[in-house]
Image (cartoon, rainbow, N blue to C red):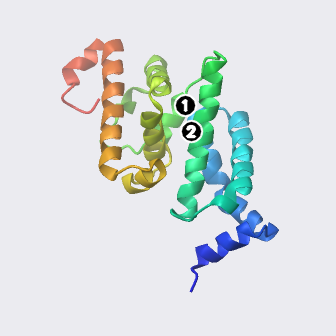
Amino acid sequence: MLTEEQLFIQSLKSGDSLAYEKLVKLYQNKVYNTCYSFLKQSDIAEDQTQEVFILIFNSIAQFEEKSTLKTWIYRITVSRCLDYLRSQSRQKRKSKGILSLFGLAQEIPANNDFTPYEHLENKEYAKIIADTLDEMKDKYKTAFVLKYMDGMSQKEIAQIMECSEKAVEGILARAKIILKEKLIAYFPEMRENKKKDI
């Protein structure tokens, strides 16, 4: 007997307009929020959200259901955002950063073990964080956004990035090290607190 999700996917594949409406209602905010976390401009995030749903609608027939629908949608969303950022880089346009000054502070839980955000009243400090994330390799950027902006578990991130949870743990650890090293380079006075979470 088919599950509720399998029945829903069948409806999508058959071109059921009501199923498409339901899909948009279920995921439009999630997709937009992820796009905004990567692109940090509302108009661009809106445009890319529309592009993501066009890709979903055009490729749903090829969805092999080897993962959940949610995981598949997030893969498409992340891929679309990274493609957009790469295209902007090719056009030599300077990115405004993944994270805004305040978005970063608001989205990352205060009790997280990575808490350099106590200094966010310093705009220069916040800009360094945003610029460093922008310069990171795609895998570090992706894992960081999914973890700290979208609040996903390492298991969910592993499914989206198609790697092991252990790999995700390593990627996140490396991303935090890169951030800490960059911050210490700009703020030498932080070096004495290096043993603590910056």
Give the label on residue 166, or none: none
Earlier-in-chain disc, 1 versus 2: 2
Residue under numbered circle 2 = 37
Residue 40 at least partly seen: no
Three-letter code, disc 2? Ser
Residue at 61%, 34% in the rendered image: 83
Does residue 19 lie above or below 133 as drawn? Answer: below
Looking at the picture, tell me which residue is in the foreground, 182 or 191. Answer: 182
Q: Secondary structure at mark 1?
A: loop
Looking at this view, name the residue that lies furthest to the right: 17
Residue 64 at least partly seen: yes
Using the numbered discs, state the Cα–Cα distance from disc 1 to disc 2 in whole angstroms. Answer: 6 Å
Quadrant into which the N terminus falls: bottom right
Residue at 32%, 25% in the rendered image: 180
Quadrant into which the C terminus falls: top left
Does residue 3 lie above or below 87 as drawn? Answer: below
Three-letter code, disc 1? Ile
Residue under numbered circle 1 = 98
**Image coordinates for residue 82, horizontal then vertical, percent:** 57, 35
The picture quadrant where one finds residue 46 is: top right
Looking at the picture, tell me which residue is in the foreground, 111 or 40. Answer: 40
CB under 8 Å between callouts 1 and 2?
Answer: yes
Residue at 61%, 17% in the rendered image: 94
**Image coordinates for residue 42, horizontal then vertical, percent:** 69, 36
